[in-house]
Amino acid sequence: MCAVGLFRLRIVTLLAFVAAALSLMCQMAEAQTQKKVALVIGNSRYAHEAALTNPHNDAEDMAEVLARIGFKVMVKFDLDYNSLRNALMEFTQLADQAEIAAVFYAGHGIEMSGSNYLIPIDARLDNESQIAFQALPLDLVLNSVNGASRLRIVFLDACRNNPFLKKIQSRLGTSRSALGRGLAAVEPNEGTVVAFAAKDGTTASDGAERNSPFTKALLKHIVQPGLDVDFLLRHVRDDVLKDTGGKQEPYKYGSLPAENLTLADTAETAAASQKPGQDAIQTQPQLRGETDKARTAWEAVSNSNNRTDMETIVRMFPATIYADLAQARLAQIAADQTHEPEEEIDVALNTTGSFNGAIQQTPEANEPKSWFMATYADIDFFGGDLYDTGLKVQRADQCAALCGGNLACRMFTFNWKAQRCFLKSSYEVAQRASGVTGGLFFKAGRSEPPPQISVQWELMVSADLQALDLGPTDDRTYAACFQNCRGDSRCTGLSFANRAKRNKCWLKGGNVGNAIDAKGVVSARRAQEQITPFLVVPAQPKD
């Protein structure tokens, strides 16, 4: 018996050791994925100027390649002023924890009095004074990568021949304008490199192929294992000069320390290029296998404009960069189907402020109705759940995609903290709730304003209402407690204790303006408020 007991003890000890080792390996692998971070932006669809052909393609391909060589990638498309600023703020926090931080921007840029600016898609630049208010200074981009400890690099494919520059100079005259051609030279901090698609004072080609000449060269060389950043940029320069017949010369600004700095490590590139099913040494087999499957699926449909193909990618691989790319493609497909080319649309795409205007300025007689999705900050739609426990997703856009692909779904609530998506066929009441995002699909003509939501309740977590007690009830779920209060005209609020063995639900009356912190208590009080969506985008038909 002693021998058996000793054997069992050894087995238990061995299993504990293996579990600890696996846990450590997972933590090390997770830490490794956070060492390199990137923000990729493609601005193509400018509201007040002709759309650019390649920035969307450039950003899409760059995001995929950076993810493949081990970067944690944020990818954004067609950002207005607020969204561009918010993306840089979010990335700043991500870069603070990283060793290498990279930003890639494709779109319009402009130089004024020696300072460079990125142009959001909603900018209307009729004179120079508007630039400081409607464009973002390049300094914000440089600040966003400052927190990285080893390498900070910014790629700017933003030196294109600029219609905003032509418009302003045509009004002021070239001699009176402080605007320069292309972008101005920069002097970043030590350890930071800024790579222009074209040398300061010159312009870059958008290209006649899928990618611009600059991005095409970057995509070719950035995956080379162990290639030092300085040599990477030299290869890019040579390729672009050759591709453009010497007309366009990329240029690097900034200096790096005397050490070998690479974007693609040898082991990462080997693993990234590994085909599913082949033997390879992988630091995180399950994650690598999922990424390989997603990459294979994306390569099969990457040139498709079929909604079903993109929805399949989002549904099957929600935690990968390919889901982001597919979601962006869905938005592009919806926009292409909804709007005619060259049509000037006043739609609030990716905005973070309030949206009070109509979807189109000029009403049309007998105008056809189209489907849109409106998103509301801190709004929960109560009732009508298609799945009682919700679906596990990581982001609100994934939740929106799931609802968009389900004909029965008309609205959704995404809980950021729990990362749960609740699809709904209808709702009973809308309530204020911190940390959630609500989405509503609606059909309207483009001259009609987006729907306002009438908020009737406010939900509070870890809070106990201090008000007149109307007495406890026998309700054992929050939903039952909530319905009880709604049906009682005297009840102006409620507190529900999840952990209480008895009297879980207390109804409140009178003034319920005060609440105190109380762990395990969920409360709600009546409210009356009209909420305007912060985001309105075209959506797939639900007819």
Image (cartoon, grey):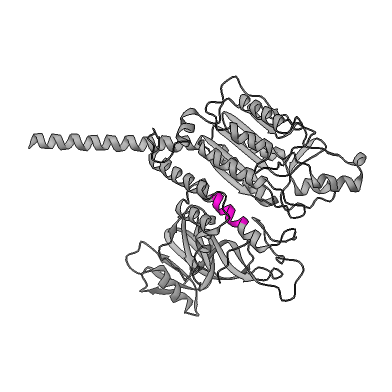
Indicate yes or no whether the magenta region holds residue 198.
Answer: no
Number of marks present in the image shown:
0
Residue 206, percent from left and from top: 72, 42
Dividing the picture into quadrants, the one containing residue 331 is bottom right
Q: Is residue 127 above or below residue 190?
A: below
Q: Is residue 488 above or below residue 344?
A: below
Residue 67, percent from left and from top: 52, 40
Q: In this view of the protein, can residue 512 be seen by the observer?
A: no
Dividing the picture into quadrants, the one containing residue 506 is bottom left
Quadrant where the C terminus is found in the figure: bottom right
Q: Is residue 41 above or below residue 147?
A: below
Q: Nearer the viewer, residue 363 or 216?
A: 216
Residue 73, percent from left and from top: 55, 42
Task: Tell me which segment is drawn in magenta.
Answer: 324-332
- Report the residue at 69% width, 62% height from top: 339
Q: In this view of the protein, can residue 367 be seen by the observer?
A: yes
